[in-house]
Amino acid sequence: MNFIAPQTARQLVDEGALLVDVRSPQEFQEQHIPGALNLPLQELEARTDELPKDRTLVLYCRSGNRSSMARRYLLTHGYEEVHDLGPLTRWR
């Protein structure tokens, strides 16, 4: 898995990137990065239109597996600027 550096993720967010948490709503309620959109991986296909194609996206999850799968899906569906932070714990 190719994760971007936490510093790079922060810089992208500071420049207007959208943080997307692909974990379950329960996991999101327990802990999340302020300002992140919760879009669970299992709902991604049905809710892809909620993500702007003209904005950089930074994805994360618990371990990096779901965010990696979400990134691959988005890249194959016309999204160009999609980055994977990996595990939420890397944000700290």
Image (spheres, helix red, strand yellow):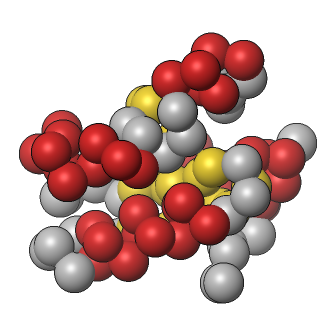
Instruction: Work out which quarter of the rendered image holds the C terminus and state it.
Output: top right
> From the viewer's perspective, is 79 left or right of 87?
left
Q: Quadrant of residue 71?
A: bottom left
> Image height check: is 77 above or below 46?
below
| Residue at 73% over, 23% down | 31
Question: Can see residue 89?
Answer: yes
> From the viewer's perspective, is 50 left or right of 29?
left
Residue 57: image location, x then y, percent = 41, 56
> Image height check: is 13 above or below 29?
below
> From the viewer's perspective, is 37 left or right of 90?
left
| Residue at 36% over, 47% down | 42
Question: Can see residue 12?
Answer: no
Looking at the image, which is closer to me, 53 or 61?
61
Residue 34: image location, x then y, percent = 62, 23
Instruction: Work out which quarter of the rendered image holds the N terminus and state it.
Output: bottom right
Q: Residue furthest top?
A: 29
| Residue at 20% over, 54% down | 45
Q: How many marks?
A: 0
> From the viewer's perspective, is 42 left or right of 58?
left
Residue 48: image location, x then y, percent = 18, 49
> Image height check: is 32 above or below 66?
above
| Residue at 68% over, 75% down | 3
